Image (tube, rainbow, N blue to C red):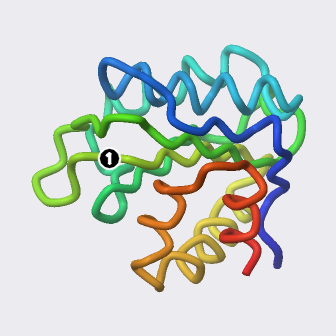
Amino acid sequence: MPLPALPERAIVIGARVRDWRAAVTRAGDALQRAGVTRATYTQRMVRTVEDHGAYIVIAPGLALAHARPGRDVLTEGLSVVTLEEPVSFGHPYNDPVRVVLGLAVRSPERHISAVAELANVFNDESVIASIAAAERPADVRALLRS
């Protein structure tokens, strides 16, 4: 199954944020701007980290921000935020984070398949560094679709 949609308006290059909350919020705002979610989904993504910790930091330099499917998910989609300066999420091994992916899906089954597809993309460890260094949204899209 393919990755969820990643429109250019859901990609933020070189965001300046002060902490992990702001980074997750930027990823959620990008999902909302793309018409994927409502603002409450962003709030739930932040709360997920507050409640469960930094497990969303899934690889060195990479966080996968998400929340459970809910009514505030309008359609499935991805967002990508690259950070000008990396931030700590409190993960013992994978901090600091340079790339934050936002994921919104409408069912638990789709969540599992989307995470599996993302894992396939990020099996190549160089992809994280390449996304972090991307200068244009088209570059990010090409890396995630290859």
- The residue positioned 17% from the left and 39% from the top of the image is 90
Number of marks? 1
User: From the viewer's perspective, is 136 left or right of 48?
Assistant: right
Residue in view at x 68 percent, y 69 percent: 144
Q: Nearest the camera: 109 or 43?
A: 43
Q: Locate residue 36: give its quadrant.
A: top right
Residue 118: x %, y % from top left: 60, 70
Q: Amino acid at mark 1?
A: Val
Please name the residue shown 77% across and 24% down the image. 32
In what quadrant of the picture does the N terminus appear? bottom right
Give the labeled residue for mark 1: 97
Residue 49 occupies quadrant: top left
From the top left corner, tell me how far across and down residue 132 is, in percent. 47, 54
Viewer-proximal residue among 6 and 109: 6
Q: Is residue 28 left or right of residue 92?
A: right
Q: Height in image: 69 above or below 48?
A: below
Q: Residue furthest front?
A: 135
Mark 1 neighbour class, 10 Å CA radius: few under 14, some 14 to 19, many 20 or more: many
Query: Residue 25, how many percent across, how many down?
Result: 53, 22
The x, y position of residue 74, in whole percent, is: 88, 33
Q: Is residue 24 above or below residue 118?
A: above
Q: Is the C terminus in the top left, top right, bottom left or bottom right quadrant? A: bottom right
* Badge 1 element: strand
Closer to the camera in the image, 71 or 13: 13
Q: Is residue 83 above or below residue 7?
A: above
Residue at (63, 67) in percent of width and height = 112
